[in-house]
Image: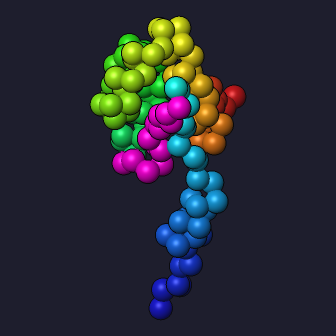
Amino acid sequence: MADKITPTLTLAALNDLDGAAAATPFTFGLSNRVVTFPDPLGLSPEAGEDLLLDLGGGKRATEVISKWLSEEDAAFVTKHLTLRQMLLLLRQASTHYEASLGSLGEGRASTTA
């Protein structure tokens, strides 16, 4: 008779942890309007990672805004912000998500001596 293996973590427990650590979507107020970036935890893993990578840099700010905001919000933001303001906005969104989710950066490799 084989030993019964008890899982260390179950899907129900994972969902409980997920609810406790949920990130709030990043919102930005501009001219009596609230613009909301998507919640990376509510997206597929690939899309959520893409959002975090896009916010981290490497793409044109206008591309990031157009990709992740609604068409109406993207047009509103690009009409009312300078490039400097848009870059700061994206940096703040990235900082907001990293505070609760951590960074997707490579970090330091572990080595053994």
Q: How is the image coloured?
A: rainbow
Residue at 48% of width from left, 25% of height from top? 55
Q: Is residue 40 magenta?
A: yes
- The image quarter in which residue 74 lies: top left
Task: Classify residue 113 as left or right of residue 24.
Answer: right
Q: Is residue 14 above or below residue 21?
A: below
Q: Relative to residue 35, is residue 55 depicted above or below?
A: above
Q: Quadrant of residue 19?
A: bottom right
Residue farthest to the bottom, as pictured: 1
Q: In what quadrant of the picture does the C terminus appear?
A: top right
Residue extending farthest left: 71
Residue plotted at (39% across, 17% down) = 78
As drawn, which residue projects farthest toward the front? Answer: 32
Q: Which residues are magenta?
A: 32-44
Q: Nearer the viewer, residue 63 or 78?
A: 78
> Residue 62 at x, y = what percent?
37, 16
